[in-house]
Image (cartoon, rainbow, N blue to C red):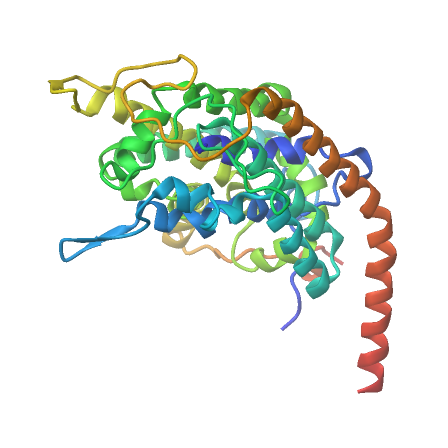
Amino acid sequence: MTEPSPPEASGTSESGVPDSGSSQRQKYIDFFLYASAAATYIPLAIYNKWLLDWIVGPLWLVAWVWGLPSLVKLVRRQPVKPRRGPDRTPG
Amino acid sequence: MSWAAHQFEVYAVEAHLPKKMKGQISWFAIFFGDFTPDFLAKFWVYGFNFHGKHYGASKPYQWHRGWPGMGISHTLFFGAMCCLGIWAWKHNRAWTIGFLLGFAAHVLTDVNDSIGTMLLFPFSTLNWSLHTWAYAATIKGGKYLDAAAYYSSLGFMMDLFWFFVVVIGSWRVLTKEFWRTNIVAADPHVWSWLGQWLDDRGLLALYRGVFFYGVCRMIAWTTWAHVVARPVINGVKRNGYPWDLSWTGPWWVQHVTLPQVTPWVVLPMALILLGVVYFVANALWERMESGSIKEIAWRNVRRKTT
């Protein structure tokens, strides 16, 4: 198994070219995901204290911010696993 | 004890690293350093009930911060021992120094409650406390009373203080750019490994997750304590726990203490020790680099000979 490369700069397209329009859209989506993660976690945690845990809390955010878009990708039959490494850059 | 402050201070430490260490200290190490003291001591503080019997410390405050007890887990001495262990094991200065800074932040923050920490252990087993708010972990009240007392006292202000230190003074630490240039750069192997499963959005959420948890637990516990809970205090049923932002508040919990030094010397000593920790970290940083290189060279020699 080859070691994966570190995460790359976002706001770039698959070819590495900056894409300002989609990055602006990404910002709104990200904001919505973070805000909705908090809006769901806090009320639930008030009445279910076991959720207020140092593992559950951060994982909730990851599940919401990464899991939801991944779920959408799965439904659309798009790849979920991150594609990194040399095969990503053309030519 | 402090609650969300411990989550926020991880980012505050990251944002205020000495210049030469920026982008080189492992964020995970700071997190684990800050997290280790309570990870070792807190479970038995609250204990658990099984078949109607309570299992846990008979004196939570003694166990948590005292000697004999797990109070050693909240001492700079123990943090230094852990760092020696990490260095001996991995020869990785990014993790050794990161752990030291995170651990020190936790120990020094915890001098604020009425029990405090044994700052000069093993030279002295006296506790150092500023008595800013009352230590409230009890067998009967458990985590709930502890949270209610903390989020009704100056402890709440402490959480807010650290929150604002991060979002006003160091907001860049939460940005994607900072994460990419400082956090990932300091720990490329760990982030690469995680990157097998998560894309950038997921990795960034993981990094921000501790801050998110801090904000949410602060809001959730405060809301529960003052809006949802219906406690009976001194025979009177109340709508929410009463606020008490006076020194050593809240008034409605029993004040417990351990043998300790006069509070007037605590703040100067805590600041001196904070300076000492940064001085030691600075002094060791360069020397550890040569140690790391030596270790890598020896590892390569061993690999070639086997």
> Could you say which is closer to the camera, residue A74 or residue B231?
B231
Residue A19 in view, yes or no: no
In the displayed structure, does residue A89 sit left or right of residue B56? Answer: right
Residue occupying the point 11% across, 20% down: B235
> Could you say which is closer to the camera, residue A89 or residue B256?
B256
Provide residue B14's location: percent of width, then percent of height. 66, 36
In the image, residue B269 above or below residue B157 = below
> Could you say which is closer to the camera, residue B55 or residue B285?
B55
Residue occupying the point 26% across, 42% down: B139
Residue occupying the point 34% across, 14% down: B244
Q: Quadrant of residue B134?
A: top left
Residue occupying the point 84% across, 54% down: B289
In the image, residue A67 above or below residue B266 = below
Provide residue B255's location: percent of width, then percent of height. 35, 26
Residue B205 in view, yes or no: yes
Q: Considering the image in quadrants, where does the N terminus of chain B appear?
A: top left
Total numbered labels: 0
Provide residue B191's location: percent of width, then percent of height. 62, 53
Provide residue B27's location: percent of width, then percent of height. 63, 44
In the displayed structure, does residue B61 sit left or right of residue B116? Answer: left
**Residue furthest bottom as drawn:** B306
Q: Considering the image in quadrants, where does the C terminus of chain B appear?
A: bottom right
